[in-house]
Image (cartoon, rainbow, N blue to C red):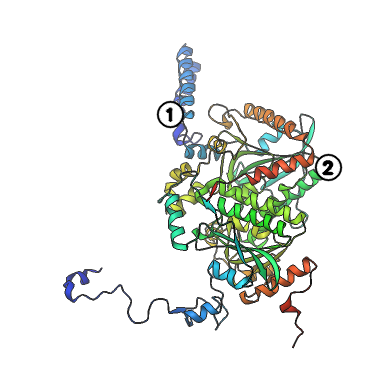
Amino acid sequence: MSWLDKLIPSRIRTESTGKRGVPEGLWVKCDGCDAVLYREELRRNLEVCPKCGHHMRIAVRARLDAFLDPTGREELFTDISPVDMLKFRDQKKYRDRISASQKKTGEKDALVVMRGSTDGVPVIAAAFNFAFMGGSMGSVVGEKFVRAVEAAIQNRCALVVFTASGGARMQEALFSLMQMAKTSAALTRLSKKQLPFIVVLTDPTMGGVSASLAMLGDVQIAEPNALIGFAGPRVIEQTVRETLPEGFQRSEFLLEHGAIDMIVPRDELPQTVALLVANLQKKDLPRETNRAAP
Amino acid sequence: MNPNYLDFEQPIAELEAKIRELQLMDDDQGLDIDEEIERLRNKSMDLTRSIFSNLGAWQVNQLARHPQRPYLADYLERVFTDFRELHGDRAFGDDPAIIGGMARLDGLPVMVIGQQKGRDTKEKIRRNFGMPRPEGYRKAKRLMELAEKFGLPVLTFIDTPGAYPGIDAEARGQSEAIARNLYVMAELETPIIVTVIGEGGSGGALAIGVGDHVMMLQYSTYSVISPEGCASILYKSAAKAPEAAESLGITAGRLKELGLVDEVIPEPCGGAHRDVPAMASSLKASLKKAVLAQIDRPTQALLERRYERLMSYGEYTER
């Protein structure tokens, strides 16, 4: 409250904090083109701006909902929960950070794994939840990812991962670093069974997640304009003391430098992944893409 | 303040200065003060022992980064014989931040790979302060695969602040280079012995750190992020680094307790740099023991054991 507000008697003071007029969240502004968008329309369009095609971050369940076919889905490994084995505390206790994130997101940790199919092709899909402590990878994410690999082997199907993470979870210290080794090692087993691993890099994919499972795909896909890299842009700027070039560490930059296979818009992911998996597993082409060209 | 000593070692530095002063007097004036010198020497030893018996994580972190701390090149000539360096990743270039090559460990041919910081300013710059670029990790991968092909054990030595966070490194795929090494090391069909000799800086360290036996020198550190980095993110102030170091549990003893490290190699009193030959000889003994313990395992058993160890990392509940 400003000094001026304090001078006004409370009876005639109007609450300036509660926004008036447009109800909160009915309209949003596109980060890409500044167009004002109707929230519901944006949601229906998978958080992609209908005006300029800018991809905004999408919630983890909405992501999987859009990717997997509506029938025959099952969520896996829902019981695995984090523990604060180091009694880590910074400004806040890790336990309290966990509880706060769980309350905010309704999730136990930062990875959701489901069995299902996409465009008719069976897959195990794992998606990072950036809203849960920045999608950071600790012991739970590592373990769930390994089990997702094992589930793919059991079901003889492909594993698809959607990454969105700031990196390793600092509050689990060296345990979180070791998740990089653990998840990468699990992928050697998937390869031995000749089962495809498809990575979809989404905004942002950095640090320990980028330097492990996220770069080990048989096919590397990225959504448009996603920030993908090892070191964060601020760290790099402080190290090299230069301004970073426009578009640095974005999907288009990675494609140009040979780091990824393709950039695919969000609404085309099911058909693209289904086609790739069907080819690698030498199966019939999925029903959507099987249609004759008009 | 004596720059050869860290802040918490200054009382030792003062005593050592006094001893030197007395020695000079002795020479100049022919006075017999041997007894006094001897007394001060003992006092200095006791003081060193007492200071070093109770170091905090931040102090260990300072020792791990000590400008006189022995680097891989200092151990190469003392631990091994017949080292021949092998260069280049065959795709882009040769990264001086990583040294690799073949050598003999008590007659046994081995592949040696590790980060190298520089000693003087010129070498520090050439070696990029021990921060590898992708071509460094790809050279390491190439040499590991060479060792696998001919059945040589791989001995890696970790000493890096981290992978280089630079524009060129990102453009050439720093993430992929690290990730690929983690993958390759998980199934490399030859024993891998990992030793952290100085700083174990995050993914840049782990990229040569997946193995069958992981050792740390007593005053080395291994962490997911530098204490300064952690402090500036979680505490919003780099000045809180000592607290962050404590929280992160970056020391050899703590990591051994947690089961993330197999062996701690004790350092000479006052740290490895106070007696490099002694450090090299105990490092050599531990390396020999570690190689012999792994070398006779059938390949399948070796890989199975390595995989199970990797899968065991992490703490969670199921409810």
Residue B128 visible in the displayed image: no
Residue B95 drawn at (x, y percent): 70, 51
Subunit of label 1? B
Subunit of label 2? B
Disc on the earlier residue, 1 or 2: 1
1 or 2: mark nearer the eye:
2
Residue B90 drawn at (x, y percent): 78, 54
Q: Is residue A246 above or below residue B311?
A: below
Callouts 1 and 2 on one subunit: yes
Q: Is residue B313 above or below residue A67?
A: above
Give the amino acid type for the residue marked by disc 1 in the picture: Pro
Residue B44 visible in the displayed image: yes
- Left or right placement of residue A185 versus residue B31 in this view: right
Rendered-image quadrant of the N terminus of chain B? top left
Residue B221 drawn at (x, y percent): 56, 40
Give the amino acid type for the residue marked by disc 2 in the picture: Phe
Task: Name the secondary structure under disc 2.
Answer: helix
Depth order, front residue of B31/A164: A164
Label 1 belongs to which residue? B11
> Dot 2: few (<14), some (14–19), or many (≥20) neighbours within 10 Å?
few
Task: Name the disc covering residue B150, or none.
Answer: 2
Give the quadrant of residue B43: top left
Residue B283 drawn at (x, y percent): 66, 31
Give the quadrant of residue B168: bottom right
Task: Name the disc covering residue B170, or none.
Answer: none
The furthest residue to the bottom: A294
Do the residues under discs 1 and 2 have CB atoms within 8 angstroms? no
> Dot 1: few (<14), some (14–19), or many (≥20) neighbours within 10 Å?
some
Measure how far apart labels 1 and 2 are at the Cα level.
Answer: 52 Å
- Left or right placement of residue A52 versus residue A288 in this view: left
